[in-house]
Image: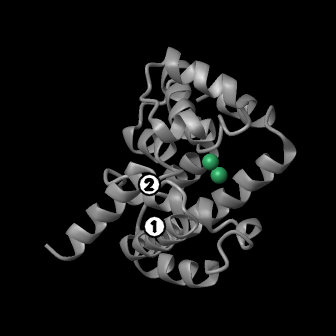
Amino acid sequence: MPRLQARLAALPAGLQSHIQRVKDIAQELALRHGVDPRQAALGALCHDVARAMPDAELLRRAAELELPIGLLEQRVPLLLHGPVGAELLRRDDGLADSSIYQAVYWHTTGDACLDSLGQIVFLADKLDSQKIGRYPYQPLLREIAMEDLDRAMLEFLSRELISLAGQGQMVHPAMVEARNGLLARQRP
Ligand SMILES: [Fe+2]
Ligand SMILES: [Fe+2]
C-alpha cells in the first residue's frame, strides 16, 4: 500500500503518536498469540486513517461509499471513521487483506466477525497508555489480553456496555453482537 505512509504523514501529530503506540502494542500481542506481527502492525497503522475527518466529511463519504449509516452513526458520525477508513484503503490503496479490512472497519465497536488479528487491533487501540483516564481498568485488560483475546474482548465489551447503559447512553448494535458472539463461543 504505497499511499499509506503519505496518508499517515498527513494526520495530526497526536494521532500519529497514538497510531505508533497502538502498533507497538499490536505487535506485542501478535507475538504472544501466534499472529503475524507484520500483519498486526499493518492493521494498527491502518486503523485510524480516517480518524481526523470532520463529521460532515465522514457522513458524506459514508453515503458515497454506500456504507450503512444507523441511528448511532447519524448522531455520532465519528463512529464512521473505521468503516470509511477501511473502504478508502480497499478502494484507493489496494488493501486486499480481508482480515485487516475487518480490523479497521470494526475497531471502534467490535463485531462478532473479528478474528485474532481484528481483536488484537481492537484491544491495542484501547490499551494505548494515553487512554488510561477513559479506561482505568487498562492494567487488568492488558493482563487478560496477553493471556486470552476472547476473554479480553469480553471484559472490555461488558465494561463498556455497563458503563454506557449506566450513563443512559445508546449502545451500538455491533458491540452487543460482538459480546453475544463471544458468550456463545464460551458457553455453547
Ligand atoms: Fe479509531
Ligand atoms: Fe485508534
Residue 7 bears which disc, if any? none
Please say if 187 is above or below 26: below
Q: Give the secondary structure at mark 1.
A: helix
Picture quadrant of residue 102: top left
Q: Image quadrant for the C terminus?
A: bottom left
Residue located at (42% from left, 30% from top): 96
Tag 1: amino acid: Leu
Residue located at (48% from left, 52% from top): 109
Q: Give the secondary structure at mark 2.
A: loop
Residue with the mark numbered 2: 110
Q: Position of residue 68 (x, y in %)?
A: 42, 29
Q: Position of residue 118 (x, y in %)?
A: 44, 54
Please say if 125 is above or below 67: below
Picture quadrant of residue 25: bottom right
Pointer 2: residues within 10 angstroms few (<14), some, or many (20+)? Answer: many
Q: Image quadrant for the N terminus?
A: top right
Residue located at (86% from left, 45% from top): 13
Residue located at (39% from left, 60% from top): 116
Name of the residue lying farthest toward the top: 64
Instruction: Decide which of tag 2 and tag 1 comes sooner along the chain.
Output: 2
Q: Are marks 2 and 1 in contact (CB under 8 Å)?
A: yes
Tag 2: amino acid: Gly
In this picture, residue 45 sits left or right of residue 16 = left
Name of the residue lying farthest toward the right: 13
Q: Position of residue 144 (x, y in %)?
A: 48, 81
Decide if ligand 1 comes within 8 Å of the CB at mark 1. Answer: no
Real-space Cα distance between discs 2 and 1?
Answer: 8 Å
Tell me how many marks there are.
Answer: 2
Residue with the mark numbered 1: 157
In this picture, residue 58 sits left or right of residue 17 = left
Q: Looking at this view, is 7 or 169 the one in front?
A: 169
Please say if 61 is above or below 160: above
